[in-house]
Amino acid sequence: MTKKNLTLIILGVVLLAFPLIVRSDYYQHLVILAFIWVVIGSSWNLLAGYTGQVSFGHAMFFGVGAYTAGILVTKLGISAWWGMAFGGILAMLIGLFVGWVCFRLRGPYFALATLAGGEIFRLIATNWESLTEGMVGILIIQTFRSKLPYYYLALLLAFACVYVIHLIMKSKWGYYFVSIREDQDAAESLGINTTLYKNVSLMVSAFFTGMAGAFYMNYMAFIDPEVVFSLHYISIMAILVGIVGGVGTIMGPAVGAFVMVGVQETFRSAFFGLAPKWISQGHAMAFGLLVIFAIMFLANGIVGDWSKIKRHVFRIKTSST
Amino acid sequence: MRISKILMVIFLSVTLCFTFGVSSSMAAGTVKVGIVLPLTGPQAKFGEIEKLSFDLALEEINAAGGINGKKLILVMEDDTGRPDVGRSVVEKLITKDKVVMLGGGYSSSVTYAVSGVCQQNAMPFLVNTGSADKITGSGWDWIYRLNPPVSHYADAVTSLLIEKVKPKTVAILYENSLFGTKGAGKFEKICKKLGIKVLLKQGYEHGGIDYKPVLTQIKRLNPDIVYMVSYIMDASLLMKQARELKLTPKMFIGGAAGFTLPEFVDNAGKAADKVISATLWHQVLPFPGAMDYYNKFVAKYNRPTEYHGAEAYSACYVIADVLKRAKSFKNTDIKKALSETDMMTVFGPVKFTTWGKLKNQNIAATYVVQWLDGNLELVWPTKHATKKFNYPVNWLKIWGY
Amino acid sequence: MDVFLQTLVAGILIGGIYCLIGIGMSLIMGVMGIINLAHGQLMMVAMYITFVLSAYMHVDPYFSLIVAMPALFLLGCFLQKYLLNPLMKVESILPENQVLMTVGIGMVLAEIARFIFSSDYKCVKTPYGGSAFFIGNISLNVPMCIAFIFAVVITVALFWFLAKTDTGRSIRATAQDKEAATLMGVNSTRITIITFGMGSALVASAGSLLIPIYYLFPDIGGPFTLKAFVICILGGLGSTVGAIFGGLTLGIAESLGATYIGMGYKDMVGFLIFVLVLVFLPGGLVGIKRLIKS
């Protein structure tokens, strides 16, 4: 127990000290991106990994959060930071609506409906030009030039998200969520209001994803519908982050986020310029192969199957020596 | 406990991986310029033409002594056509590669996002293709643009319309991207000013299979001209289906982009003939080196080039010229040199001034080209024209009905 | 009136191709209970096969159906056997593992295509590609009509296969009740492999038929995957008859939407119908039939 606390403290210190030691904006930027993915991945995981409702449309919540922040600037002229609050809440309300539509059905319907939902929002954002500026996108000027404030805000957001989910999962709610995932009928017969708790899970998930979206707007300072409502780069990525890291574990998505951002940037920059340039063409391929590999051999992700990984690595070591 | 250990290991390996990458050192006697282009992704085709043109110009510049004896190095980064990636790579170029200035910028949205970063970091950025007005119209003083903004793409077309076609009604179709939306919006305004009635203005999501419903609508409205802002494959499909429907306005006009590429005539076949389009450059223009550049490009890469390539090639020469004149490679000195630019390139004369609401904008002319028997010929303005503007056109006869 | 008729005809013609795409997805959904999110990418592979045959060997796109369909059948079988079926044995928390696997497969297929053919747009030129004939004022594109006829023929052949052959009956039995079918001696593993192969072959035929009308590039799959699953939901999950209705409905709805609401909203019409169906008619269009019966 104390050892666990110790490692957590070390981890915390490392994360807090990172931008003070590694001064390069570029690496700080990558870690900030990873933090954003920690939030999205963890939120997705709460809904999919713990409650068993696989969403293919988290871009919907992310985009709503981002656009809330952006529209606050362009239409009302107030700071995009307000979006951090309103974006989360608005995403939550949309989550409530999506839940109302989808949770009356079971099976793959939820996955399909969220997928369609994400696309509908993308098309609305593209076509409703008077509100969203359409494909022109929204550009704001960043509040801070230094990365440090963003770094610590992202860290705080990621920490808050992971910690809140941790608390939820330790509470009664968490128990209800998992029982819904394991067997909805059994949960129902135990007197758990499954529709209610599925909605609760969805709303918490949407709230954090919306906050992440609003933070993204503040940090990246530019959004357009293709960026924040992207099926491929947001919704599917959220799933991949969860799967690679470990579905149904607290730290899984966090690990997945760092791995995914790392893999993506490593390939895009062709191993930081060390490998031949054509490698960078393969970043999407590497992604796909990683997913196939993870599902085949690490069904529960890096964190979920850690003991398996350790065993394998260990065996290879002993056999080679 | 287990979990946090894993996190540690992964985190450390990721950081290691990152720090390992920091190996780029500043070699003496070189000067680095960052170039942002889409080298993968859906716009990679255009990014490729620009990259090759940059390479071609770079070779020539370094062979001729580089920047006052220093070797010019272009650090090319792939923005994959996405604004968020574009932003990241520019930050990398600025902070990690320590480039002295930036060039490139293909798609409007990526260029716009990148410009925001440059303005904030006081990094001179010479845009050569991104055409949304906002890029130089936001009052930013670190952003310079070589190409005309999209709102002026139709300038030559407009004068052609006034003098030759004299239409009364128009139908406008456009791809609902940043480029398409702005181009169509501006053309609508021009039409209103000229007293041409806009019967229909409709955007579409690119990649459609069947445009016949909307084309039938246009046929019923029977406008004098049909103006389309489309990328390449949509452009071919639109013309092919217009032919199938026997939609015969007085003239089909393309707003640059898809309508000037060789693939357009390849795919649309005879449906492409006599279609006119706005363009920014043609190799027959009387600018020193224009034809040379075209020939060199074809000889070296064995494929034709077009206005995107010319923009990139010229941008490279402008960058070299600016760096030669700059007192030092400090951002303020480079900015000063950029502002004082006054030179001739294959793309025409380059000088950055204020143009209406646009700041640091090169005032470049536009031209009209027409597809005549499979060749793209310059037809307007007449003083540069290689072939006479074919008008009026009997579409049904050309289409083989 | 002309505008309306032209819109309707365009919708029906494209609907024929949508049917082929949808039926393939529906078969897979019915038997395996999974959404195949690599469906459009499989079509993309078939399109590249057709393209290569046509560009380098001058095989007519319609003849290349004979190559593309079996090739995709084998590819589908391979994917099911070596990538999807093993997952049934893997213990994991999410039941959707197979769906997520198809996402990975789709990404890899698209990237392989990009590696070989680059991101460039490709197009196959045929002598009949731009030919059209008129009925009244309605223009009909020849390849579009041929595609529609092929779609009808292939669909009829499929229904004959499902109704009359042993394998076809086993597939239907498995779709209806997997456990019962297994008890009755149906080799369900073999059936899943054949079904995925057939689903792929069907979408391959759609790809080959689209070639003379459309163009291709590595990312073409995504939008068609989305269309495929919208069709499936419209028709009722896993129902092959429903997929035909779904395909035609989507084709017509998109076309009408493009004319009367705006081209930019074309895709949204499909999704909106989809959500409405989901809310008010969860059984899809086939559900109406049941409603009327009861």
Image (tube, coloured by chain):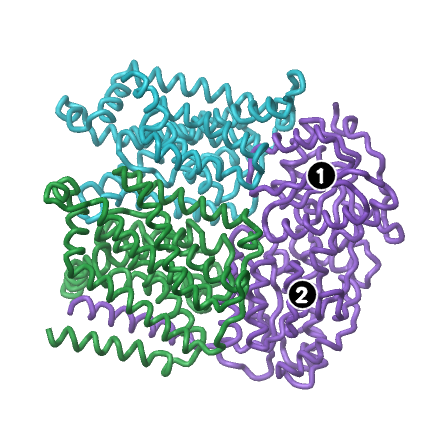
Chain colours: A green, B purple, C cyan
Residue A105 found in image quarter: top left
* SS assignment at label 1: strand
Residue B106 found in image quarter: bottom right
Residue sitting nearer the eye, C45 or B336: B336
Q: Report x, y in % for residue C181.
A: 17, 24
Residue sitting nearer the eye, A298 or B216: B216
- Establish if A147 lies above or below B154: below
Image side of residue C218 versus residue B223, left or right: left
Question: Which residue is depicted at the point 69% across and 39% down?
Answer: B265
Question: Do badges 1 and 2 share one subunit?
Answer: yes
Q: Report x, y in % for residue C99.
A: 30, 42
- Establish if C73 lies above or below B84: above
Cα distance in 3D space between marks 1 and 2: 28 Å
Residue type of the residue flagged with mark 1: Ala
Image side of residue C237 versus residue A283, left or right: left
Residue type of the residue flagged with mark 2: Gly
Which numbered disc covers residue C67?
none
Whether residue C153 can be seen here:
yes
Callout 2: chain: B
Q: Report x, y in % for residue A38.
A: 32, 63
* SS assignment at label 2: helix
Q: Dot 1 corresponds to which residue?
A: B171
